[in-house]
Structure formats: structure tokens, C-alpha cells
Image (cartoon, helix red, strand yellow):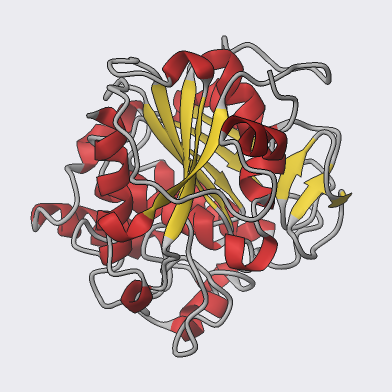
Amino acid sequence: MCSRGVLCLLLLTGLTGGEAAVSPLGSYGADPDQVSVSGLSSGAYMTVQMQVAHSKTFMGAGVVAGGPYFCAQNLATKAVGECMESPGKINVGYLQQVTRNTAATLTIDPVSNMYNHRVYLFSGTHDTVVVQGVMEKLQEYYTDFVNSANVKTQFSLAAGHAFITDDYGNACSANADPYISDCNSNEAYNILNHIYGGNLLKPNAFASQTGTLYEFDQTDFVNAGLNSMDTSGYIYVPGGCNRANSNCKVHVVFHGCLQGKESVGDEVPTYTGYNEVADLNDIIVIYPQAVTKAMGNPNGCWDWWGYTGSDYASKLGNQIKAVKGMVDRVLA
């Protein structure tokens, strides 16, 4: 057994240094009714886009410091303005109508699929990157589509802009690289536990891991360079899921800006706490990876303002198509 993801990666792949060999993403026969998604910052916006575009596939979402669907409306100026720091300018009613209109074009799934989704929203009181008012607008956005009884919020923790852990990272109130903060709170567990009904096993400090963190080839799913995605991503597969017809749950985690492996290595898949929860509860975790692009995406963010093209928030968007392909592969 391995107590940390990095150690597992080295021991179970037989490597003693350098990077693991990149292999095609495997098929695990996972449960198509138990697929969910979460993310931070640009990854939070991408989470909402994946959830809305493929609402038939995803049954739950965890959003950490993001905002409403199509908030930026193809404009970088809106992205860095109202969608991060000026929430009073966000017209939620308009974004709700855009969602319905887009569903009518069949480029996103029917909005009725979202009614039974389970949604967890997190925003720290010290977040100066995406202020809490933006997340409150997201909460308002969901009132048109998701059963309010299924939406849980955590807006009271004195946290900055970060994935929140109970044992790793910056001081809780920090808004700084690598955007992982120790707040004595296992938000990965809180997110997954809410999404999957409230009865997940919670890891303790002495929990060991049976699974493996693999690096897989993302170019099977996308022209990586043209779409600001890395050539490889990560997947964590618990020991009980590393087989065909596993019937395990699947969760996708989107990192934030400046958090891809080109910036921070494997810190997000290793230290944010998802793998420990996944290991105890038979959840396969996919960690897609974005990269910087000199024109349009200098910080390696996921596309939530249109740098890959005007279809970025629909099923036609290249990043969304790529990640949906990854999910489909794991389900096969």
C-alpha cells in the first residue's frame, strides 16, 4: 500500500526517477449513472460548462470559486471584470435564458436533466481573485435549473482562492501559488460526499492508498497544442477499480489557472485530497490538464471566455469534447 500519490506513482510503475511513461487512457467499465465533476477558478467555470453541456452525463458538480454558465460571453474583458470582481454587473436572468436557448439548439443537453443534480458551492471569505458575490450569482443561476434541496453552500470559511485541504498547502487565507491551502477542512471529501448522497467513508490521517496515479495521453482526445491542453493528463484508479467492468464512480477534477502540471507538477492530483476519498469509496478520478498558450491563454486556464472559439461552452467546444471523450473511455 502507498500512503501518498507520488509514492504510489513511483512504486507501482516501477520508476525511480523522472516522469512516468505516458500510456493510453484505460477503460474500466465504470458506472454511467455516477459521473460528477468539480474544479477551482477557471476549472470551476469549466465544471459548470461541463455540467450544463452534458447534463445527461454528469449527476453532480462541486464549484470552488467560479461563476454562472456563459458569464464571460466570449469576452476576456467580461471574464476578468464582472465574472471575477464585479458581480453586480452579472445579469443572471440573461444567462439563464441563454442556457435555455442554447439547449433548444441541441448543442447542450436539455436543462431538465439538471433538476436532480447535486451541487456543492465553495467560496472563501478571503478570496480576492473570484469574490464571493460571483459565487452568489452562480447560486442564483442554479435556482432556475436545480432542485434547491440539492444545493449545498460553504461561504463562511476564512479561505483565499484555492483548493482547500485539511493538511497541505499555504495558510488558509492565502491567494497564492500553488492555490492549495491548509484550512483544516477536507473540501474534497465535502464535495464528493455531498454529490454522492452523504454516506461516503472519510479518510483519516493514517489512511493508506491502494490505487495508482497514472499519466495518460491526452492527444487521443484533442489536438493539444491548438486547444491549450497538455499532451498528458492524470487519472487516479483505486485498487478496487483497476479492472474491466468495475462499476466504480467517476469524478473529473479541473485545476485552476497556473495549476496545471507544467506549472506545479502533480501537486493538484497528489495533494488536494481527492485520491484519499476516492480510494475508500471506489471513485476513479480524472485530472485533465491545460497548458499556457502565448496568444489568449498565458496562465494555462481552462477556456471559459472563448480563446478556443465561440463554441467553447457547448458540446461542440474542443476542450469539452476532449474531456467528454476521456469520461466515455473510462466508462467503456
Q: How many marks?
A: 0
x and y, in percent, of residue 201 in the image:
63, 11
Q: Is residue 131 above or below residue 136?
A: below
Q: In this view of the protein, can residue 199 be seen by the observer?
A: yes
| Viewer-side residue, 163 vs 217 | 217
The answer to whether 157 appears left or right of 249 in the picture is right
Q: Is residue 72 above or below residue 40?
A: below
* Residue at (25, 47) in percent of width and height: 325
The answer to whether 224 appears left or right of 184 in the picture is left
* Residue at (32, 78) in percent of width and height: 226
Q: Is residue 24 above or below residue 218?
A: above
The answer to whether 40 appears left or right of 143 in the picture is right
| Viewer-side residue, 225 vs 115 | 225
Q: Is residue 175 above or below residue 193?
A: below
| Viewer-side residue, 248 vs 3 | 3
* Residue at (18, 59) in percent of width and height: 102
* Residue at (79, 56) in percent of width and height: 160
Q: Quadrant of the N terminus?
A: top right
